[in-house]
Amino acid sequence: MTGGGILCLLYMTAIFADFLAPYPVDLQRRELFYHPPTSIVWHNSAGRLSLRPFVLGTRRNADRT
């Protein structure tokens, strides 16, 4: 029963992957190849709670000059 529950959870995650992912599948930002990964938060930049995961924007050190 536990294995079946885990399998159902994995199938549901695969079905709703577009909803759960913070970026669309076809987005590639090749200019940020060496950019560090960002953390996923549950609020937007204005601080409002969101039901979808949200990725806050970051800047590289070279961009801060």
Image (spheres, helix red, strand yellow):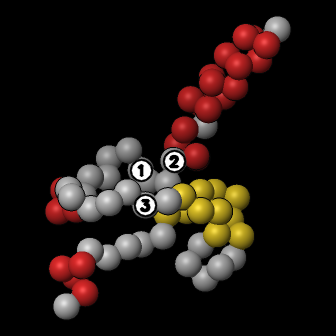
Q: Is residue 63 left or right of residue 11?
A: left
Q: Position of residue 54 (x, y in %)?
A: 55, 62
Q: Nearer the viewer, residue 25 or 5?
A: 5
Tell me the element at label 3. loop
Residue 19 location (% of width, % of height): 58, 46
Label 3 and label 2: CA atoms lie apart by: 13 Å
Q: Is residue 60 above or below residue 32?
A: below
- Residue at 73% in and 11% down: 3
Task: Give the position of the N terminus as an image quadrant.
Answer: top right
Residue 15 placement (x, y as % from top left): 59, 30
**Closer to the camera: disc 3 or disc 2?**
3
Q: What type is the residue that disc 1 sits on? A: Pro
* Element at label 2: loop
The residue identified by callout 1 is 24
Which residue shows up at 17% across the image and 62% down it?
31
The amino acid on which the numbered mark 3 sits, given as a three-letter code, is Thr
Relative depth, front residue between 10 and 61: 61
Tell me the quarter of the picture where residue 35 sits. bottom left
In the rendered image of this protein, does residue 19 appear above or below residue 44?
above
Q: Earlier in the sequence, mark 3 or mark 1?
A: 1
Q: CA distance from mark 3 to mark 1?
A: 16 Å
Mark 2–mark 1 Cα distance, whole angstroms, equals 7 Å
Q: Residue at x 50, y 54 (%)?
A: 22
Q: Secondary structure at mark 1?
A: loop
The numbered disc on residue 21 is 2
Few, some or many residues within 10 Å of mark 2 (<14, 14–19, 20+) = some
Q: Residues within 10 Å of mark 1 (few under 14, many from 20)?
A: few
Nearer to us of marks 2 and 1 is 2
Pointer 3: residues within 10 angstroms few (<14), some, or many (20+)? few
Residue under label 3: 38
